[in-house]
Image: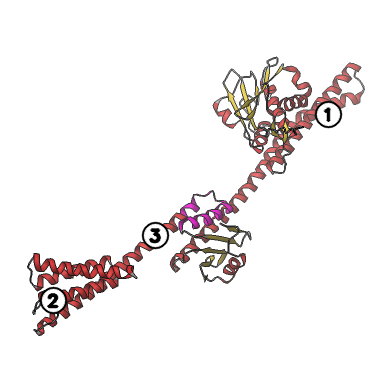
């Protein structure tokens, strides 16, 4: 009550103060006083409420009569022209008050619309800056609406996926309300909850509901259109990504088949030649043993090529499942060396493992395959007789395994592309066998474990490939007091 009376009281007091200043300080006549009072009424109409401006108009009229229109010091008028002056002054004051209030209302409306437009622009900008994934856009829409419009809760239903995204999993918004808004296409308000359809043209994208202070109808409609544009953009981008993924998959299959076909020719030719000679029966016992060794070696090579292709295909299709367990670095390294068999005979291999090494949290089979690919790469690109060093150490709570060779090294361009699928360096066409799949497999396995694989190289001084893996959580041993 006091707050309600305070504004009108200040408005009336301001008119009295202006009148007293004109009477005692300026000694002005009725015309000058009327202009000052009218100025006060205009200021009240600009910055005060409409009721306060009306009070200021009436108070100014009474003060003008009391102090400036004869008889002075009385609320009465002896001359009929005085009534005319007061009537004109009051009419002008009320008209000015009404115009000021209307201008102020329009100013406030423009400020509100500008604020709403800025919020919708911020929402649209957040959508444009997203990576284009449908789920990412849905999360942005819900979270940004909560942030920009100070909502208590928000939920979005998308017809294409049938999913509901919520800001609060235990909120009051029901999925039925969202589906109803999407089905009937009408804006409904129930208490503090508002549900709106998400449509663009004749296509329905879903429904959106929020709990909070009611928003203007224009803002609600703009919000629905912005959300619809965001979902349309996300669905379009998703379709484009799927088409690109299909195209890249077909391209990958084509490249893989070409690479395998090229690499399979050499072992198949060798096996065929050895089989023909064995079948002829015109070979000595020593030659027979050599030919059988050739068949075995080339068969192993074929098995390795097919294994790499299968590994890469499973990784590409995300069809492999990690069986994580604590794995010791020395065990993983020994397993990788053993899998290469006689291929390691041409190089001395030195293993350096730091004492008190923590175990890695890894899939032993896949990590052994990773180390095998790095070791196989070192064997291919190191001159015969040059040592290869495999080391393992702890680095800030992580397990680091490195393979270092003394080959010719890599250029900066080769280092940036060495882990790309089917990439082969500048010397790969000079008799070095391979498909370019091994290091790509190594990188995919490392990243699947949450780790990394990097290369450091210098021309003429060899290369060092480093794998970093998360360490297994330490087991706490407990003892029961006797």
Q: Which residue is located at x 26 percent, y 73 percent?
A: 98
The answer to whether residue 249 is magenta is: no
Relative to residue 432, is residue 114 depicted above or below? below
Q: Comparing marks 2 and 3, which lies closer to the viewer?
A: 2
Dot 2 lies on which element?
A: helix
The answer to whether residue 144 is magenta is: yes
- Identify the residue under disc 2: 66
Q: Which span is picked out in magenta?
A: 124-148
How much space separates mark 2 and mark 3, taking CA atoms? 47 Å
Q: Are the two marked residues, 2 and 3, in contact with CB atoms closer than 8 angstroms?
A: no
- Identify the residue under disc 3: 115
- Identify the residue under disc 1: 272
How much space separates mark 1 and mark 3, taking CA atoms? 79 Å
Give residue 118's position: percent from left, percent from top: 41, 57
Give residue 377's position: percent from left, percent from top: 68, 25
Q: Residues within 10 Å of mark 3 (few under 14, many from 20)?
A: few
Dot 1 lies on which element?
A: helix
Front residue of 320/438: it is 320
Q: Which residue is located at x 59 percent, y 53 percent?
A: 135
Q: Which residue is located at x 75 percent, y 20 percent?
A: 344
Which labelled disc corresponds to residue 86? none
Q: Comparing marks 1 and 3, which lies closer to the viewer?
A: 3
Residue 287 in view in this figure: yes
Q: Residues within 10 Å of mark 1 (few under 14, many from 20)?
A: few
Residue farthest to the right?
A: 281
Relative to residue 58, is residue 342 depicted above or below? above
Residue 434 in view in this figure: no
Q: Main secondary structure of the magenta part?
A: helix
């Amino acid at each position: 009550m006091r707050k309600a009376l305070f504004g009108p009281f200040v408005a009336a007091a301001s008119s009295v103060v202006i009148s007293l200043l004109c009477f005692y300080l300026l000694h002005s006549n009725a015309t000058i006083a009327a202009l000052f009072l009218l100025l006060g009424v205009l200021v009240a109409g600009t910055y005060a409420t409409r009721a306060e401006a009306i009070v200021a108009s009436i108070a100014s009229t009474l003060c003008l009569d009391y102090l400036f229109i004869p008889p002075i010091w009385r609320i009465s008028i002896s001359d009929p022209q005085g009534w005319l002056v007061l009537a004109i002054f009051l009419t002008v004051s009320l008209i000015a008050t009404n115009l000021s209030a209307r201008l102020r209302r329009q100013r406030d409306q423009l400020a509100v619309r500008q604020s709403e437009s800025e919020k919708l622009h911020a929402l649209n900008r957040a959508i444009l800056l997203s990576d284009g994934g449908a789920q990412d856009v849905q999360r942005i829409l819900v979270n940004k609406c909560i942030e920009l419009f100070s909502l208590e809760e928000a939920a979005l239903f998308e017809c294409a996926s049938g999913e509901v995204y919520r800001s609060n999993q235990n909120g009051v918004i029901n999925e039925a309300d969202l589906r109803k808004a999407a089905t009937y296409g009408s804006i409904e308000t129930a208490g503090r909850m508002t549900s709106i359809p998400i449509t663009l043209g004749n296509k329905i994208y879903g429904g959106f509901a929020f709990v909070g202070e009611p928003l203007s109808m224009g803002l609600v409609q703009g919000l629905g259109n912005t959300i619809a544009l965001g979902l349309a953009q996300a669905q379009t981008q998703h379709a484009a990504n799927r088409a690109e993924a299909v195209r890249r998959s077909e391209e990958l299959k084509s490249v893989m088949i070409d690479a395998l076909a090229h690499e399979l020719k050499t072992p198949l030719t060798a096996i065929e030649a050895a089989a023909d000679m064995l079948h002829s029966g015109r070979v000595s016992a020593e030659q027979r043993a050599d030919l059988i060794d050739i068949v075995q070696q080339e068969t192993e090579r074929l098995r390795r090529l097919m294994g790499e292709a299968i590994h890469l295909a499973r990784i590409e299709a995300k069809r492999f499942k990690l069986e994580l367990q604590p794995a010791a670095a020395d065990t993983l390294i020994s397993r990788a060396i053993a899998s290469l068999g006689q291929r390691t005979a041409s190089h001395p291999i030195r293993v350096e493992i730091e004492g008190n090494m923590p175990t890695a949290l890894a899939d032993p089979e896949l990590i052994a395959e990773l180390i095998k690919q790095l070791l196989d790469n070192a064997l291919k690109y190191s001159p015969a007789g040059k040592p290869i060093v495999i080391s393992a150490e702890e680095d800030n709570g992580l397990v680091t395994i490195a393979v270092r060779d003394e080959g010719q090294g890599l250029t900066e361009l080769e280092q940036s592309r060495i882990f790309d699928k089917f990439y082969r360096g500048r010397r790969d066409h000079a008799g070095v066998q391979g498909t370019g799949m091994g290091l790509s497999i190594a990188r995919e396995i490392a990243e699947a474990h949450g780790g990394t694989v990097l290369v450091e190289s210098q021309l003429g001084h060899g290369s060092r490939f480093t794998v970093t893996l998360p360490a297994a959580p330490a087991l706490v041993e407990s003892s029961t007091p006797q």
